[in-house]
Image: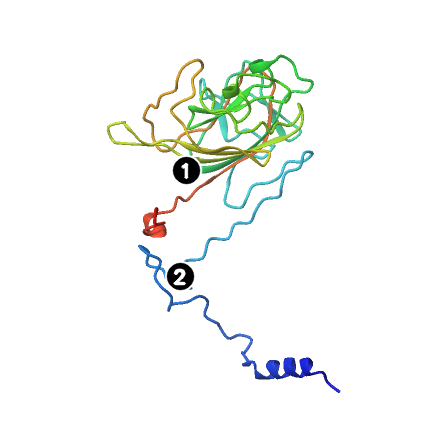
Amino acid sequence: MKSPLLTSIAALVLAAPAFAADEKHPIGYQDTPIIPGTKWHVHDGERPQPPVVTPGEPSTIEKAGTAPSDATVLFDGKDLSKWKMEKDGGEAAWKVEDGHMEVVPKSGYLMTKDEFGPDFQLHLEFATPNPPSGDSQGRGNSGCFLFGRYEIQVLDSYNNPTYADGGATAIYGYMPPQVNASRPPGVWQMYDIIVEGPRFTPDGKLAKPLVVTVLHNGVVTQNHTALIGETPHRKVGEYHAHPEKGPLKLQDHGNPMRYRNIWIRDLHMPTPEDIGDGPKIGQ
Ligand code: MG
């Protein structure tokens, strides 16, 4: 004898409307309220779908990963064709071997040939010299300069005390990292840097500061930090108006630092049409 439950399920299955396999079912809704300030209904099936991006292979300590499908690859371990010397625009003189590049001390900073901005996501990996030598700012020092002028500090901060606004992922001379997520010397580490570039008025005044979020080995160390300006040594930084796009630079601070798997993707900042009226503060 069939159980009452099975009988009920069978009745439901039989009662379900039969759809042809190729029939298109509408997605979403057109009879829901409009999201205030936008042209979209809640759950609007006509709202554009996000583009598909194939993520890259994740990095491991032993092996560099790969970039997402919509990124610009700046270094994939093979050559320095996307880079030049900052000082004279000459051929990039850092060493490339075993899938990484290495600072040749005293050769000078590297700079990208292309410019990026205003808003982007940057991924880079580095390893500090092992065994370590020197201390404080003299140990495993490099840096990643956004727009060629704002330094996100790269440093061997593993058991290496230094001034807080000079440690790994510090906004140099301004904002220490929230935590020190450093790995030991010689072990590959990752920075993921989300950049909202500064904007300037036509007469060169600051309209919107540079805002930076940094993940160090997957740990947030800068959370939407607004910079007070550039990142000089022993001075309070100031802004100096510059174009919305700029190069990236990697610092030669005299230490044979290694880099690998560097890529960048443009970021879409939500437009007023996306946001609509936004949240109602204080309601
Ligand atoms: Mg540095």
Residue behind mark 1: 119
Mark 1 vs mark 2: in front: 2
Give the residue furthest to the front. Answer: 283
* Residue 27, placed above or below residue 201: below
* Residue 282, placed above or below residue 184: below
**Rendered image quadrant of residue 159:** top right
Indicate which disc, 1 or 2, sits on the residue closer to the N terminus. Answer: 2
Q: Secondary structure at mark 2?
A: loop
Q: Residues within 10 Å of mark 1 (few under 14, many from 20)?
A: many
**Rendered image quadrant of residue 88:** top left
Q: In the rendered image, is residue 92 in sight?
A: no
Q: Position of residue 93 (x, y in %)?
A: 55, 20
Q: Is residue 70 left or right of residue 278?
A: right
As measured in the structure, the alpha-carbon distance from the residue carrying label 1 to the one carrying label 2 is 28 Å
Q: Residue at x 34, y 30 (%)?
A: 243
Give the residue furthest to the left. Answer: 203
Q: Relative to the observer, which residue lies in front, 140 or 97?
A: 140
Residue behind mark 2: 42
